């Protein structure tokens, strides 16, 4: 038996992140669920008591202050303690970016457990979701907004148990590369990249050297110049416009960086591409493809 207050939100739902269900349970001794599947992501957070959680062939004994993730279509089982049955809140969610958010939080089937000391705040968030339970745009937006806050509280204050150091390092590099891909056209510096992923510049340097064989500055410059070569070959934009489009406010600085990498000026490169046709174009496209493949490997 369990005393549960739960809500499920039906209807067609689309978007980057939205609530499927939420609730609060005060369980009886040895109350259990599963082994069974869930069609969406589900996070439980233990407010009091103890229990155990099983997924991916591993068992996790849990107590107050811990939470666990159930991933879609993954067989899971959990059970309350015989002497100190647990009370927990839960939120089920889906969305186009749900997997990305969960992964960036460091949670997965292999690492499904986290610790967070903000139990009162997490309880208040779920309580607010449950209070705004009727159909309508206003309540939909309210619940989905609270979901984002719920995940941010966990991400900010939790420590994922048994987090693999290599996985953490790869996550930092992937986030840094994604930031560069989205912002290379702006006047960003390596310090901006390090600040975005919340690590210091020297550690970011070490991670990039180990992952891609170059420094963050070299990677940023290579990415910008690679984009510039595409624009030089495929457009008739002036050099000044190409420089600005690739994050260089000063065309002279852009020309110097381009010359260092390509051993010729942007103007000369464009002329060579125009008259070289076949062979040089193929070489250029292969270089671009190799660099893109290198980036894509970081997302695997």
Image (spheres, grey):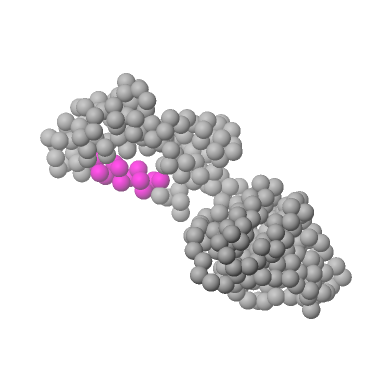
Magenta part of the protein: which range?
283-295
Quarter of the picture containing the N terminus is bottom right
Q: Is residue 241 left or right of residue 7?
A: left
Q: Residue at x 12, y 35 (%)?
A: 275
* Rendered view: 5 above or below 218: below
Residue 209 in picture, x, y percent from top left: 48, 37
Q: Is residue 284 magenta?
A: yes
Q: Is residue 262 left or right of residue 169?
A: left
Most extreme residue toward the left is: 275
Secondary structure mostly seen in the magenta stretch: helix
Residue 94 in picture, x, y percent from top left: 55, 63
* Rendered view: 8 above or below 115: below
* Rendered view: 217 above or below 104: above
Q: Is residue 170 left or right of residue 251?
A: right
**Is residue 223 visible to the viewer in this orientation of the structure?**
yes
Q: Residue at x 61, y 57 (%)?
A: 142
**Is residue 99 visible to the viewer in this orientation of the structure?**
no
Q: Residue at x 39, y 35 (%)?
A: 185
Q: Residue at x 20, y 35 (%)?
A: 236
């Amino acid at each position: 038996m369990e005393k549960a207050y739960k809500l499920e939100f039906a209807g067609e739902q689309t978007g980057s992140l939205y609530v499927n269900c939420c609730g609060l349970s005060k369980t009886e001794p040895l109350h259990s669920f599963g082994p069974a599947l869930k069609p969406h992501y589900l996070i439980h957070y233990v407010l009091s008591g103890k229990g155990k959680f099983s997924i991916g062939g591993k068992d996790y004994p849990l107590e107050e202050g811990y939470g666990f993730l159930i991933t879609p279509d993954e067989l899971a089982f959990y059970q309350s303690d015989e002497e100190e049955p647990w009370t927990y809140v839960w939120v089920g969610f889906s969305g186009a970016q749900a997997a990305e958010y969960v992964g960036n939080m460091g949670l997965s089937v292999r690492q499904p457990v986290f610790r967070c000391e903000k139990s009162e705040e997490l309880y208040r968030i779920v309580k607010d979701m449950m209070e705004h339970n009727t159909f309508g745009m206003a309540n939909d937006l309210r619940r989905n907004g609270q979901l984002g806050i719920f995940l941010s509280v966990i991400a900010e204050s939790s420590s994922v148990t048994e987090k693999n150091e290599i996985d953490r390092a790869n996550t930092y590099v992937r986030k840094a590369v994604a930031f560069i891909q989205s912002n290379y056209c702006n006047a960003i510096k390596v310090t901006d990249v390090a600040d975005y992923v919340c690590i210091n510049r020297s550690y970011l340097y070490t991670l990039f050297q180990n992952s891609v064989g170059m420094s963050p500055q070299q990677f940023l410059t290579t990415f910008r110049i690679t984009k510039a070569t595409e624009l030089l070959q495929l457009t008739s934009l002036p050099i000044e416009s190409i420089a600005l489009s690739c994050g260089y406010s000063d065309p002279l600085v852009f020309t110097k960086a381009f010359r260092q990498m390509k051993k010729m000026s942007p103007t000369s490169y464009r002329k060579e591409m125009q008259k070289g046709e076949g062979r040089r174009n193929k070489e250029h496209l292969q270089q671009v493809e190799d660099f893109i493949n290198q980036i894509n490997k970081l997302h695997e």
